[in-house]
Amino acid sequence: MKAPLSEFLMEDLLEEHRFSARFNAGESGHRAQSLGSLLTGLQPDFNFNLQDALSEVMLSDAPNMGQEQLRSLVAQLHPGASPENVLITTGTSEALLLLLRQLRPRKLALIAPAFQLLSEIPCSLGAEILPLPVRWNALGHPEAPIDAWVNAIQANKPDVFIFNHPHNPSGLLLSQQHIEMLLAASASVNCVVIGDEHYRFLSRPVPEPGPTLYARGRFVTGSFIKCAGTPGLRIGWCVGDAQVLQAMQSEKNYLTHTVNPISQLIATWFLQSLQRSNGFFSVLHSEWLENKRTFAQWKSKQDLWNGFEPAGGLVSCVFPRGSLQAAEAGSGLHPSVTSFAALRERGVFLLPLSTFEQTFYSDVALSLGFRLGFGLSTAQFKQMLSVMVRSDL
């Protein structure tokens, strides 16, 4: 790398508050599941005892590219791919790090604001960042100025586009027409597309993965661990050109080498369950839908916050009501602006949007808003929203 990595502001704040907040809505994933609840939820889809099967796992290195059965299941999620097009990684962060080090972008486009890794790693490799900025209207609704994004790609000719979608932190889910417009613009300037699809499993009203960006000449990184409340499994993948994946694994030998065989076995069971009755994940998907409905009702019955439920993924943004209008009018912060400290005093942890300031996004929204996670249990989510409108905040 050409430059040291900057401090990871978001992760530092999450580490400081995630274990002490009564309502931890600063996270970007579903509430964590215990190993017992995961195995119990998956068990009805299998004719053998999952716990017994786990006890027989050898704690040895796994195949370097990942276990064949798991790679085959991941390939099935990406039409046109085969197991040779799949590399199993220790989370998607490792997949992105390895892939970007292979592609070595000179100019990289991404939808901003973004997860800090998406801009920081390319910058450390000497890349220039082309942000495609999301905008929030006065009511806190995220909007994608697609024509402006297409023009920016065609005029600036990035060589890599990280298509981070469904979008974190806005919760945007683009129409297929808009997706095709961005893909066509990228193709017109010979720009390699990386689909960052961490929220693909929560992008439809039914509990099944949404469409993928994968195609010949493109790459995709993804996982189910945030959507399924199992980030501790540290399972991710990259799907793309087999030769590039082989080079990524060669470098992976200097990092995590192979992925934990227990995690890979559980990931295999999860993906197999999706093809069967899907009893475990469908419950979490239903909770996601219920929390979105709860938020939609809540926002219409209170006058302290603006924002919208995510169209895709587990996060969206909220703003103290009136703050965006006041900022747009140049009249300073609205008197109702609620501070991070005031929320924490009531047990609520939301992630300030200011932690996204290092991702080449300069809108005033970063100083006013918070990222709100939708991964709490339905009961906790309702309780948290009621706390957020208490008059003593």
Image: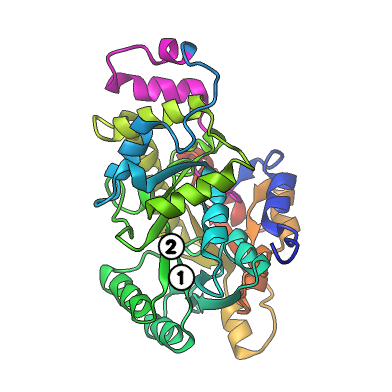
**Res. 40 image quadrant:** top left
Label ID, residue 186: none
Label ID, residue 194: 2
**Res. 285 image quadrant:** top left
Please give left or right for residue 336 compared with residue 73 in the image.
Answer: right
Q: How many C-alpha atoms fall within 10 Å of the one at disc 2: few (<14), some, or many (≥20)?
A: many
Q: Are marks 1 and 2 in contact (CB under 8 Å)?
A: yes
Residue situated in front as seen by the camera: 322 or 349: 349
Label 1 belongs to which residue?
161
Is residue 34 depicted above or below 183 in this figure? above
Magenta highlight range = 25-54
Give percent across and percent down for residue 174.
Answer: 35, 68
User: Cα distance, mark 1 to mark 2?
Assistant: 6 Å
Amino acid type at mark 2: Ile
Please give left or right for residue 12 compared with residue 244 in the image.
Answer: right
Question: Is 269 in the magenta?
Answer: no
- Tell me if I can see residue 313 in this picture: no
Which residue sits at x=45%, y=38%?
Answer: 65
Residue situated in front as seen by the camera: 345 or 253: 253
Residue situated in front as seen by the camera: 367 or 235: 235
